[in-house]
Image: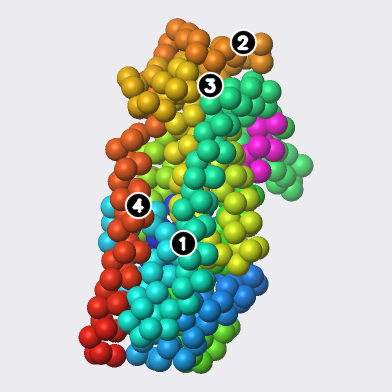
């Protein structure tokens, strides 16, 4: 439950940060949806992930009851280090690190499996960053002009009480396009919550289910409930970090981030890799912000890290496709690149990504090497 609680604090921000940051959902609604869809993901696809995490990195025989409790404690402790700082840590990386520490100490680690997992940990964030960087730099303004996913003032929907039976109607300023795009953002966020549950429930209960101490259904229910508790409490900081601090997220940006990261997580899960939703989604946000922030400079200047570019507001939101400024052009009413991409926050996130699994692995290795358990 301690691990599941911290999973809820971390993964809720990753799944619903874009939707909350763009103003589509409130934090309470995001927490409620996270709870339901994470439990659904754990109850369905999560069963396969539980079986994989509980027996392939190290043999099931290594998961004695005492060893399982120790591994889960290190996972929760490492996540607890990052959550108070508002950083969406990678639960999968932290859990695998704790299990790897156990395997290294006992000489039972499957190096082939670990090499495959670590390779994807390196490749997947790079793919996520560059897909969204290309979209932000070359495609985003045209999508904005074509789709026009602006948020109008006032309520999205209202209840029409004429006729005796209340019926939902579009708000006075809401268009069908706006309503459809808003629903799509929420649907994709719920899909991300489903994927997070399918992967992260295993991180909380796989050792205990693997050694038979807890039955599969009971473990999933306990983990799902604990994730929900974390979503309603400590997830508020990670919702702010992912949704607001890394980059400003209008509704179109939220849709792009959620679609790309959810697709990448689905691919990784399909090939049997413990998928890091935190890394993939956050690197999508960083990539999109960097791409948008470097639109008015050449690619060479952007990569050289020179003077911060100025991004035209008109390059991000325009009335017609033919009004999009060409690459390298500037326009009046410029918006600073720091408003779109915050290197300080990005560095803090990457630091904690490296720190949490390292702490988990080192602490686990030290404990089991000492022969205490």
Q: State yes or no: discs 1 and 3 in contact (Cβ < 8 Å).
A: no
Residue linked to disc 3? 316
Q: Earlier in the sequence, mark 4 or mark 3?
A: 4
Q: Marks 4 and 1, Cα distance to the nearest angstrom? A: 21 Å
Mark 1 and 2 residues: CB-CB less than 8 Å, in contact? Answer: no
Q: How far across and down, in percent of the image, does residue 154 sit?
A: 55, 31
The overriding secondary structure of the stretch rendered in magenta is helix
Q: Residues within 10 Å of mark 4 (few under 14, many from 20)?
A: many
Q: CA distance from mark 2 to mark 3?
A: 11 Å
The location of residue 14, given as percent across then percent down, is 47, 52
Question: Dividing the image into 4 quarters, which one contains the C terminus?
Answer: bottom left
Q: Which residues are magenta?
A: 177-186
- Callout 2 touching callout 3 (CB < 8 Å): no
Q: Is residue 34 above or below residue 185?
A: below
Whether residue 344 is visible here, answered yes or no, is yes
Residue drawn 62% across the image and 10% down it: 323
Residue 361: image quadrant is bottom left
Judged from the image, the secondary structure of the residue bearing numbered disc 1 is helix
Q: Which residue is mark 2?
A: 323
Q: Indicate which label's residue lies in the foreground, 1 or 3.
A: 1
| Residue at x-position 50% and y-position 10% | 329
Q: Secondary structure at mark 2?
A: helix
Q: Measure the alpha-carbon separation of dots 2 and 4.
A: 38 Å
Query: Outermost residue, top direction?
Result: 332
């Amino acid at each position: 439950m301690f691990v599941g609680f911290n999973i809820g604090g971390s993964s809720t921000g990753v799944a619903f940060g874009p939707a909350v940051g763009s103003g589509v959902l409130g934090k309470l609604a995001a927490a409620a949806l996270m709870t339901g869809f994470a439990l659904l993901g754990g109850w369905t696809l999560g069963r396969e992930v539980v079986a994989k995490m509980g027996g392939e990195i190290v043999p099931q025989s290594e998961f004695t009851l005492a060893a399982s409790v120790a591994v889960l404690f290190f996972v929760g402790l490492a996540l607890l280090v990052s959550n108070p700082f508002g950083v969406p840590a990678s639960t999968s990386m932290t859990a695998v690190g704790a299990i790897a520490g156990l395997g290294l100490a006992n000489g039972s680690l499957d190096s082939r499996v670990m090499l495959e997992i670590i390779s994807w940990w390196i490749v997947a964030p790079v793919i996520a960053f560059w897909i969204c960087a290309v979209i932000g730099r070359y495609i985003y303004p045209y999508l904005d002009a074509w789709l026009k996913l602006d948020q109008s003032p006032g309520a999205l929907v209202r209840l029409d009480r004429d006729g005796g039976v209340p019926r939902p109607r579009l708000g006075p300023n809401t268009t069908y396009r706006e309503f459809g795009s808003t629903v799509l953002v929420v649907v994709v966020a719920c899909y991300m919550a489903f994927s997070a549950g399918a992967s992260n429930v295993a991180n909380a209960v796989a050792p205990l289910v693997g050694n038979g101490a807890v039955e599969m259904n009971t473990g999933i229910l306990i983990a799902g409930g604990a994730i929900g508790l974390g979503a309603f409490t400590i997830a508020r900081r990670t919702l702010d970090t992912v949704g607001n601090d890394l980059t400003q997220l209008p509704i179109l940006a939220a849709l792009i981030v959620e679609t790309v990261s959810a697709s990448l997580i689905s691919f990784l899960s399909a090939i049997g890799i413990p998928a890091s939703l935190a890394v993939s989604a956050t690197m999508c946000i960083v990539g999109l912000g960097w791409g948008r922030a470097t639109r008015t400079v050449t690619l060479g200047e952007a990569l050289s890290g020179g003077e911060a570019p100025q991004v035209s507001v008109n390059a991000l939101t325009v009335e017609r496709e033919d009004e999009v400024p060409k690459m390298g052009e500037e326009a009046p009413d410029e918006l600073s690149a720091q408003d779109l991409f915050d290197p300080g926050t990005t560095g803090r996130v990457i630091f904690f990504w490296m720190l949490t699994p390292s702490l988990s692995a080192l602490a686990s290795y030290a404990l089991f090497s000492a022969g205490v358990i």
